[in-house]
Image (tube, rainbow, N blue to C red):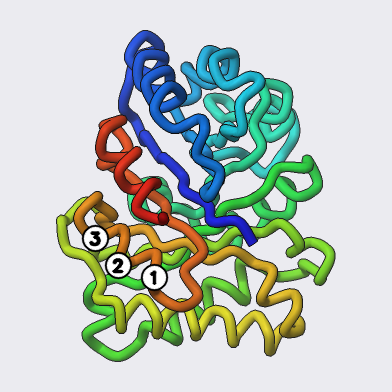
Amino acid sequence: MQTLAVANWKMNGTIEESLKLVTELKNKIEDFSLVEIAVAPPFTALYSVQVVLQDTPFKLAAQNMHWESEGAYTGEISPAFLKDVGCAYVIIGHSERRRYFGETDETVNRKIQEAIASELIPIFCIGETAEERRSGKMEMVLERQIKKGLRELHMPDLKDLVIAYEPVWAIGTGETATTAQIEQAHQFVRDLLAKGYDAPTANGVRLLYGGSVTPENSKTIFQVKNVDGVLVGSASLSAEKFVKIVRSKE
């Protein structure tokens, strides 16, 4: 399976700034075929970025979506709108959404189901807090998030699913999980999927690592067993840094 690198720009970048960044990325790395690249700009820049990415291997991703395709949901974004603007991926359940906006395992599940129904590929985010890790609850938390997040999903629904393990204590903190910690978490997720579905289905799900990924640690992260890519936050706001991360897969 092809390695995936996702650039999550979060709430950063005007349309002009987003166009400058994506154009720089395109010029520097469009010919690099070892890694599939998805870019998740702010909603306001989605269409403009998609215009630049046309006829390139790059994919467009959204940072969030609602679980309904339309209706009286002021301020929300419909998966149908994301599909219409050219999105292939959508990030669901990011820890910042859970922390600041009250997203739960149940709402994450509704979003995942609707994304699949709308032919968008979910990037399903999971991860434990520092306190949960210290108290030995990492596996329990991941199991709960996965079982509830994937409730009522069947094997065919998982054929394109992406899961991003992002330990909350490593996001935006400069602290990165050790290779042993990453391998333990990813192996646990893979085994859990195999138990809940089957081994071929589990092996077909791409598992990304997200949590202070930088050009300095990305090569090591790519080499960890069961790491099929990375979800990059702050480092993706620099074309130079993101390109170095992607090319470290060589």
Q: Residue at x 78, y 42 (%)?
A: 119
Q: Position of residue 135 (x, y in %)?
A: 25, 88
Q: In the depicted view, which residue is nearer to us: 56 or 76?
A: 56
Q: Is residue 103 above or below residue 47?
A: below
Q: Residue at x 68, y 89 (%)?
A: 195
Identity, as a three-letter code, of the amino acid under mark 2: Thr
Question: Quick one: SS at disc 1?
Answer: loop
> Do tag 1 and tag 3 residues touch (Cβ < 8 Å)?
no
Identity, as a three-letter code, of the amino acid under mark 1: Gln
Q: In the depicted view, which residue is nearer to us: 53 or 13?
A: 53
> Do tag 1 and tag 2 residues touch (Cβ < 8 Å)?
yes
Q: Is residue 140 above or below residue 39?
A: below
Which quarter of the figure has residue 98? bottom left
Q: Is residue 136 left or right of residue 229?
A: left
Q: Is residue 67 above or below residue 76?
A: below
Question: Quick one: SS at disc 3?
Answer: loop
Q: Position of residue 112 (x, y in %)?
A: 66, 54
Instruction: Measure how far apart labels 3 and 2 are at the Cα level.
Output: 6 Å
Residue located beneath label 2 in the image: 220
> Do tag 3 and tag 2 residues touch (Cβ < 8 Å)?
yes
Residue located beneath label 1 in the image: 223
Residue located beneath label 3 in the image: 217
Q: In the depicted view, which residue is nearer to us: 104 or 232?
A: 232
Instruction: Measure how far apart labels 1 and 3 are at the Cα level.
Output: 10 Å
| Other residues around mark 3 within 10 Å, as few (<14) / some (14–19) / many (≥20) | some
Identity, as a three-letter code, of the amino acid under mark 3: Asn
Label number found at residue 87: none
Q: Is residue 181 left or right of residue 56?
A: left
**Looking at this rendering, what residue extends furthest in the top direction?**
16
